[in-house]
Image (tube, grey):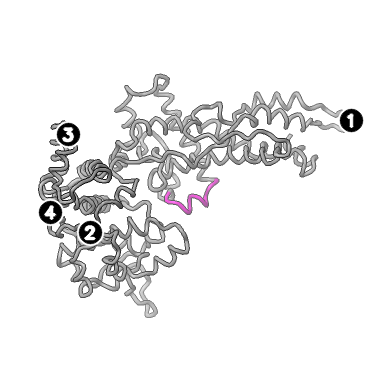
Amino acid sequence: MANDLKNDTDSDQFKILKKFNELKTKLKLVALNLPSIMKMVNFLQKNLFKSYFKYTAQNKTIGQYLNEISGQWPKDWTQDKVKQMIESFQQVWIYFKLNSKEFIKNNSILTLNTEFEVSLNSKLSYFLPTLSGDGLFCYSLIQFLSSIQNEMITYYHEIKRSSNSAILVPVNIELFENEDLIIKFDENNDLFRLVQANFWYDSKNLKCVYKFKNIENQIINLYLRAKPKINLKEMKLFEYSDEINDYSIFKRLDANSLLDINNQIEIIDDFKKINEISEALNTLKVIMNYVSTLSTDSTETISSFVRKIYYNDLQLIKQSEQILKEKIIEKCQVKHLKNIWISLMMKRSVLYTINNQDPFDYLNPAFKSNDSIELLDLNLLDSNSILVSVLIAVFQIITFDLSALNNEEDIGDKKGQKIKHIIMSLDANPNFLISTNLNKLPASFPDHLEVNNLTIDDSIDMRTPIRLENIYEFWKLLCKKIRY
């Protein structure tokens, strides 16, 4: 039928039928896999949203997690059904990587080897949708499948606009585990019978004659008319418990009360493992929520404030004190919360880097130059306090400045700027916490770095300015030098 539809009809005829035929294979991919994918994603969101550490999700497989909570599975879930859900991710991934090369090329999903296969041994973090890092994998597959149904439904309504066809309100993606919302058909039974009932054989001209109008109308009635578009704008992205996603809370905290750098070093030295830092950040986030909503004395100690908000729960008070440890509880005040948060986030990012994990998966690749670099001037590294001060400054530049850039022109302007000049100008920005130690930088901070992976010849100057396009490599180099 496809060839007859293409060759024996005018371009303006049966447009919806032609579009349906064009998207038929992709629509089958959606029908077979989107409900299963959304069942798994919705289940994980329900159980883990804002209650799971990022590091844990990155170091546990989906199979391990599901086995741990097998008693909490929905009643209709079985081992075979779970395997089928994971297989749905794999089937879409196979099609996606072959048909969306441009998308993969421009996104951090490229960090996956092209031979990557989705299985119960895949990291749990791949199944928690986010806009960067591991979760971009899941988000991209859902976005890809949704775009297929939306393309078909949008086209149908554009063509039928003159006939006043009812346009259904887009439905949130979370509801698409319900198969009734999806364009679903059985090609070997439903479509075959539909076509079979609408053609006759012309024995004189030895060809099949199809009633394309009837076929198109029945496809509209059976598969398109009652189907909605998928609303992705309000898709619930996953939030880890140890990350602040509402920066309005963070911005309301006092940015001008700085701990002495030696006190900061004492605090971060107390935390040796990523998980214990994550627990502390999670506890701090609760405290910061209270601070942002209550009238508080900024000079009140953290210990006193914790006892105030948990006054009738001695167990929570003790737990918070154990998690935050003595130096934060006894020596720090409410006005230091932002400083403590940034210091611990920086320390956790250092530990991620030392463990060969990228703590800045949201950072645009333009700032992740692959040049292998060495500092020429090592005076900077003589003082651990200066090194920590620089790490905290670089962390803030990446997290609060560069990560917010998405305009190509802005990124292009920014990446050529010198890191030293940016750091030296930070004290004029009220949103940044900058140690007074950085006043010592002009004499010790290197202006240039040595690029190791260039072919050496007379035309190449091996010294190049340290620019923001090198900031991630610069960060990694600092992490190698720090003494924890």
What secondary structure is found at the residue carrying circle 3? helix
What secondary structure is found at the residue carrying circle 1? loop
Question: Where is the N terminus found, in terms of image quarters?
Answer: top right
Q: Is residue 103 within the magenta segment?
A: yes
* Closer to the eye: label 2 or 3: 2
Residue 127 located left or right of residue 219: left
- Packing grade of label 3 (10 A; few <14, some 14-19, many >=20) is some
Residue 96 located left or right of residue 288: right
* Closer to the eye: label 4 or 1: 4
For marks 3 and 1, the one nearer the N-term is 1
Above or below, comparing residue 169 to residue 428 in the picture? above
Question: Where is the C terminus found, in terms of image quarters?
Answer: bottom left
- Packing grade of label 4 (10 A; few <14, some 14-19, many >=20) is few
Please state which amino acid type lies under the numbered disc 2. Answer: Asn
Which numbered dot is residue 422? none
For marks 4 and 1, the one nearer the N-term is 1
Of residues 27 and 266, which is closer to you in this image? 266
**Residue marked by disc 4:** 266
Residue 307, position in %: x, y? Answer: 14, 38
Above or below, comparing residue 227 to residue 408 in the picture? above
Please state which amino acid type lies under the numbered disc 1. Answer: Lys
For marks 2 and 4, the one nearer the N-term is 2
**Residue marked by disc 1:** 204
* Closer to the eye: label 2 or 4: 2
Which range of residues does the magenta coloring cover? 99-108
Which numbered dot is residue 316? 3
